Amino acid sequence: MKQYTVAIIGLGGRGLHTYAKYAKLHPERMKIVAVADIIPEKVTFAGDTYGVPQSGRFNSAESLLEREKLADVLIIATQDRQHRDHTLKALDRGYDVLLEKPISTFANECIEIRDAAKKAGKLVTVCHVLRYAPFFRKIKEVILSGAIGKPVTVNALENVGYWHQAHSFVRGNWRNDQIESPMILQKCCHDFDILAWLLDKRCLAVSSFGSLEYFREENAPKGSAARCVDCAVGDSCPYNAVKIYFDSEIGFNRGNREWPCDILVQQPTAETLMEAIRKGPYGKCVFRCDNNVVDHQIVNMQMEDNVTVSLTMTAFTAVNTRHVKVMGTLGEIVAEQDKNLVTVTPFGGESTVYDIAAIADDLSGHGGGDNRMLTEMFDALDCGGDVSSSVADSVASHLSALAAEKSRVSGGELITIADFERENCKQK
C-alpha cells in the first residue's frame, strides 16, 4: 500500500475543509506536500496544519502549475470557470487529478477535459461523491437485486434548503451564472449523475422549466435594509444572516465551527463571525444581492429503455437533503436521505426498511461519500484501475445538466443529448 503525495489548489470549503482532512485520517495513504490559494491566510493555515514546507506554499494555482510536477495527485478545488485551464495544465505536467465538480461550466470544455485525460492516460476522478455514499449504494443494490422488478419511473427531489440557498446561491460564490455555473449544473450535476448510475441508463433527452422567483429586490419586505445587521424586520425573516449563522441548526450557537460558518471566516469565533456578517457578502440582504440563478427548477428526462425520470430542485424546503422514489414493475423504493432510510415495498408484500445509519461505519461528508471516494481513488492508483466517478461517466451527466439549462432558457424546448454533444464537440 503506497502513500501518495498530494498538492491542492483552491483552499475553500472542499479543498481545505474536506479533502485535506483525509491526510489526518489516513496519513499512511495521503501526504500533502503543496498548497495554493490567492488568500495568504488560507495558505498559511493549510501549510501549518499539514506540515507543508515553505517551498510548497503558493499564492495562486497558476504559480504552482508553473513548476514541474510536485506530487503524485493534484486536487483541483478552484472556482468552476478555472477548472478547464487548471486541469489541462495538470495533465500536461503529468498529475493524476481529483477534480471538484462541476468539471466545467461549458459543455465543450467538459468534452475537452474528458478527451485530454484519455490522451494523457491519467486518472481524473470527478467528485461525484454520492456514488460512494452507503445510502445511494443501498438503493442501487436493491435495484440490482430485482426486488422491485424493472425500474420504470423515478421521482427525485433535491431539497436545497432555505439557508443553503441563501448561503451558496444568493449570497455565495454560485449566486450568478455569469461568474460561475448555472444552478442546475452546480447543485444538480450530482443528481443527474446519481440517477443515471442508479438506473445504469443513459439520458437521451431533457426538457426543463424554472426561474428566479423570490430572491429579487421587489420582494424585499417593507422596512428591510441592505445588510441584515441593520434590518428593522430581521426578527421575522428566516433568511436573516445572524439567525442562520448563529441560531439555525448549522449555527455557531449550536456548536458548529465548520461549514458553512468557516466559509465566512477561517476559524470562527462569535466575534469574528459577527464581523464577517457585518462587513462581508454573507451578511447582505438576500433580496439585494447580484444573484441571478434560479431558486426552483424541474427537469423531465427520457432515459434508455423508456425509463422516465423527473427531478425537482427547490430552495423552498426546511431541510437540506435528497429524496428519491424508484417505481418498478414489481415494487417501489422510497429513500429519504435526511433520515438515512431506504424503504423497499414489493407489491402485495411487506415493506423492508434499511437504516443506513445502523449499517454504515462512516456517514461524515456527503453521507460518507467524501472519504470513500478518496480511498477508491488511491486504491485505483495502486492497481492502475479506474474509479466509479470517472471523467468519462461524469461528462455524460454534465451534458444532461447543461442541456436542461438550455431547455429552461428556451422555454422548455426538448433537447436531445446526442445532438447537444455533437454541437459542443464542434466547438472544441
Image (cartoon, rainbow, N blue to C red):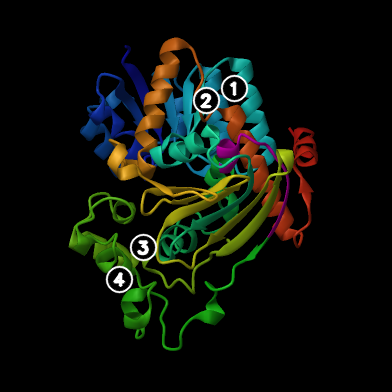
Task: For the residues labelled 4 and 3, say whether their Cβ atoms are less than 8 Å apart.
Answer: no
Residue in the foreground of this view, choosing between 354 and 198: 354
Give the foreground label among 4 and 3.
Answer: 4
Above/below status of 327 relative to 69: below
Residue 261 left/right relative to 82: left
**Upstream in sequence: badge 3 or badge 2:** 2
C-alpha span from label 3 to label 2: 35 Å
Residue 145 located within the stretch drawn in magenta? no
Highlighted range, magenta: 195-208
Number of numbered discs on residues: 4
Q: Residues within 10 Å of mark 4 (few under 14, many from 20)?
A: some
Where does label 1 land, which residue? 117
For the residue labelled by badge 3, is the local secondary structure a helix, a strand or a loop? loop
**Rendered image quadrant of residue 213:** bottom right
Q: Residue flagged by tag 4: what amino acid is it? A: Lys
Residue in the foreground of this view, choosing between 207 and 167: 207
For the residue labelled by badge 2, is the local secondary structure a helix, a strand or a loop? strand
Where does label 4 land, which residue? 243
Give the foreground label among 3 and 2.
Answer: 2
C-alpha span from label 3 to label 1: 38 Å
Where does label 2 land, which residue? 124
Residue at the image position 48 percent from the left and 34 percent from the top: 141
Task: For the residues labelled 1 and 2, say whether their Cβ atoms are less than 8 Å apart.
Answer: yes
**Taking the image as drawn, is residue 366 in sight?**
yes
C-alpha span from label 2 to label 4: 40 Å
Residue at the image position 54 percent from the left and 21 percent from the top: 91
Image spot of residue 180 (x, y percent): 56, 50
C-alpha span from label 4 to label 1: 45 Å
